[in-house]
Image (cartoon, helix red, strand yellow):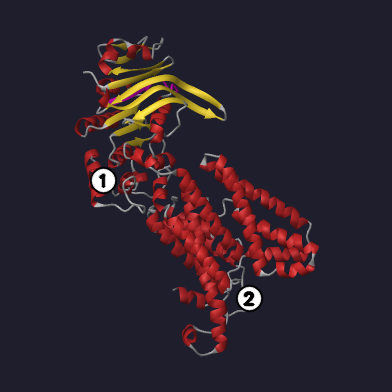
Amino acid sequence: MLINLSLGSVDIPFKSILQIITGSDNVKGQYIVLQYRLPKGITAVLVGSGLSICGLLMQTLFRNPLAGPFVLGISSGASLGVAILVFGIAVFSSSIAGIAFSNIGLALAASVGAFFVLSAVMLVAKKVKNTMSILIIGLMFGSFTAAVISVLAYFSSAEQLQQYVFWTFGSLGNLGWNEILILSIIYLGSVGLLITVVKPLNSLLLGENYAVSLGVNLKKVRNITLIVTGLLTGVITAFSGPIAFIGLAVPHLTKLLIKTSDHKILVPAVGIIGAVIMLASDTIAQLPNSEYTLPINAVTSLFGAPIVIWLLIRKRKIHY
Amino acid sequence: MSENLSNTIIQASDLSIGYKTGKKAIHVAENIDLSLYKGNLVCILGKNGIGKSTLLRTLTKVQPKLSGKIVLGGQNLETITNTELAKKMSLVLTERIPENNLSVYELIALGRQPYTNWVGSLTDDDYGHIDSAIAQTNIKGIIHKKYHELSDGQLQKVMIARALAQNTEIITLDEPTAHLDIHNKIEIFNLLKELTQELHKTILISTHEIHIALQIADELWLMNENGILSGKTQTLIENRSVAKLFSSDLVTFDLKSKQFIINNY
């Protein structure tokens, strides 16, 4: 299914031809597949499953169906980093601007921004006992950074605005093999760490007091979950832009399809469905056989939101 | 009967309970000296807002104490880790569980968490404890239902089954019969009494069901503005301590029927 989806996009090569290409033959086709299609497919899988798993954990931790990977203000942090880069640095020197607007420059700025906001939220969170307050603090940081971005945007030129807006559209195609390697390592490390909180998250389904009475070290679980999801979503956002919707909706979709609350089943299921949906969105975004591509961010929401609404109306009840 | 020290399972001395808001502490009750004895069914009685839940939450480490000392099984409560404590004491709380898709069986199985490995896989021993908890509470017919499909009475039994699966010596329950009809109330209290008699559990309940408590509890902890009075149920009835619990113009305590009776009727 994965191969099928990643191949069914853009140019002319058909499935059968491509399968030969991966072995030998056709230099042009091989180049497209190995340098463009395959990295993009892998990115879609990592991004889709990573964001979805983070979303699931956040929803359980905050016991809130509206929580997602970005509630801690990570995407706004990344956006702020990029905004400062695009709107700010370009003013001082056009020579830096050349480097700055490269993908690596944007990724770096986004990482720094995301990390900065995450640290700020974590610092405040340390002083707050109530998990719900952390959620609100995250949202407040989000609004704050959004406001700063608005101010920056107000004083910037049309080209800069466009540059920034393009980044916010999200893109899976900006990663070369080196970036994918970095993303994969961080993905595997994060998911590995998150597996250790699967058991305590199950007892958190009963509420915090019950979880503690079952021997859960709440602070530790909370910190691991927040830092790891923060890191993973931060890196994903840095490389592929603030991809909306997936992290919020995939956990709900999964729970509607698989009626369980056991995180041992949910985490892998959410990961797989997230990857599939991301691949599907990417395929749609490529507008197969046309030379236009839609912003990935628009596709995920454009097709995803109606599906979730339809599922909810049909099933009526939502659990988190 | 006289309880000796070795029979004590929880010992509180000079305990002060309440809340901390910022640097200010709000004392709900002070100078508390209490002993909980093994195998007893103990009911905490008192008016709304007098601190029954606070006391229960403090003794179970859900909430920190303000000062004083709590000893559980010879060990200072603060030095016991959460995981160790989870093997000694289980809770049934008043708070509702957040909405989710757990089945009754899964919910009860969560009671085994203190004993399972890092991914939480269940062993034969775990299944044994879960099954006997289900049998003891007589809920075999509903174990495959989702917990949000249950009635309040069924839910309370399931929460007790979960506490039983946790296989602890002590079970504490905070107003376990608050939303139940009289039939379910009595059923729950009978079940708890059985657990002390058959499985030698020590059970501590905060409750407003005075009439049931007076008939069923081995001991009462009576809370009022002046502090906490603990003792054998019969003793406290006879020395009129129970009668003083709600001394007002509204009700008087009838010794014969062990009931509060509304005045002017």
- In percent of width and height, residue B197 lies at 20, 30
For the point 52% across and 24% down, which residue is it? B26
Residue B109 x/y as whole percent: 31, 47
Q: Where is residue B248 in the image (x, y as percent from the top left)?
A: 41, 11
Q: What residue type is labelled 2?
A: Tyr
User: Would you call the spot at circle 2 few (<14 residues within 10 Å), some (14-19), or many (20 or more)?
Assistant: few
What secondary structure is found at the residue carrying circle 1?
A: helix
- In the rendered structure, the answer to whether residue A83 lies left or right of residue A266 reads right
Q: Where is residue B222 in the image (x, y as percent from the top left)?
A: 36, 18
Q: Mark 1 lies on which chain?
A: B
Say above or below: A110 vs B15: below
Is any atom of residue A95 visible in this view? yes
The magenta stretch spans which residues? B40-50
**Residue A82 horizontal side relative to residue B22, left or right:** right
Task: Name which quarter of the figure residue B244 lies in.
Answer: top left
Label 1 in the same subunit as label 2: no
Q: Is residue A71 above or below residue A98?
A: above
Quarter of the image with the N terminus of chain A in it: bottom left
Q: In which quarter of the image is residue A162?
A: bottom right
Q: Residue at x 47, y 58 (%)?
A: A53
Residue drawn where x is 43% and y is 42% of the image = A207
Q: Name the residue under label 2.
A: A292
* Chain of residue at mark 2: A
Residue A138 shows up from this direction? no
* Residue positioned 75% across, 55% down in the render: A152
The number of numbered discs placed on residues in the rendered structure image is: 2
Q: What residue type is labelled 1?
A: Ile
Q: Name the residue under label 1.
A: B130
Report if the CB atoms under discs 1 and 2 are less than 8 Å apart.
Answer: no
- Name the residue nearer the viewer: B130 or A98: A98
Q: Is residue B27 above or below residue A277?
A: above
Badge 2 marks a residue whose secondary structure is loop
